Image (cartoon, grey):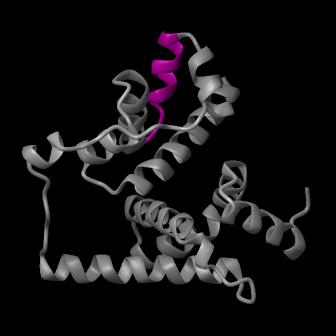
Amino acid sequence: MEVNNKNLAVYILKAKNGDQSAFRFLLDFFWPDVYNYQLKRTKSENDAEDITIQTFSKAFDKIKTFDEKYVFKTWLITISKNIHIDLLRKKNASIFTETSKEQEEKVYLVIDENPTPEDKIIREQNLAKLLRDIKQLKPKYQEVIHLRYFQELSYKEISTQINEPMNNVKVKLLRAKKLLAEIIKRT
């Protein structure tokens, strides 16, 4: 399907109404733009990927505030740029926060949505082959897949364990499932 401004406006509207497939489309469509922008800024694949994940996490969290008179890609890039600036400030200030065991114990379970097509593909695979395929992912993606599907942790529990906001966990898991599904389809 050719994507034009009208089609894009429909996906954005659907995403504003909570449509998960619209979120997936926007993530897949704009991922290369945001990732490449950050790769040029950071000169690091890992940093670019982490900032891109945070960008989509924040954008999806705030999508209802997006004003259609602006260009969505520009909005994403602005969010991405601000996240990068914030990370540089934090790095320069050397501020680190860690969660205590007591905080971790106060975590509550979050009800997760129904399985996506990627979830179904993952579950249908032979375990040995699946483990080989998972090992082809970057370590941070292996970790969220392992925590979610092998340890069966909720998003909130994963968020606590890897010390990242829950929205980052959701975007990282969405990206990991997409990459894993592509690996599975190739083999």
Write down the quadrant of residue 29 in the picture.
bottom right
Whether the magenta-drawn stretch holds residue 131 is answered as yes
Left or right: 12 in relation to 103: right
Where is residue 181? Give x, y as percent.
63, 33
Write down the quadrant of residue 120 in the picture.
top right
Where is residue 37? Give x, y as percent.
54, 75
Examine the residues drawn in magenta and state their main secondary structure.
helix
Left or right: 152 in relation to 92: right
Rendered residue at 77%/63% (across/down): 11
Q: Residue furthest bottom?
A: 69
Q: So how many labels did they put on this image? A: 0
Vertical position of residue 89 compared to residue 1: above or below? below
Where is residue 187? Give x, y as percent.
66, 23
Where is residue 16? Give x, y as percent.
67, 65
Tell me the magenta residue range.
127-138
Vertical position of residue 27 compared to residue 148: above or below? below
Whether the magenta-drawn stretch holds residue 174 is answered as no
Vertical position of residue 180 compared to residue 35: above or below? above
**Between 171 and 19, the one nearer to me in the picture:** 19
The quadrant in which the N terminus is found is: bottom right
Left or right: 123 in relation to 15: left
Rendered residue at 40%/74% (across/down): 42
Rendered residue at 13%/57% (across/down): 98
**Between 81 and 167, the one nearer to me in the picture:** 167
Vertical position of residue 67 compared to residue 173: above or below? below
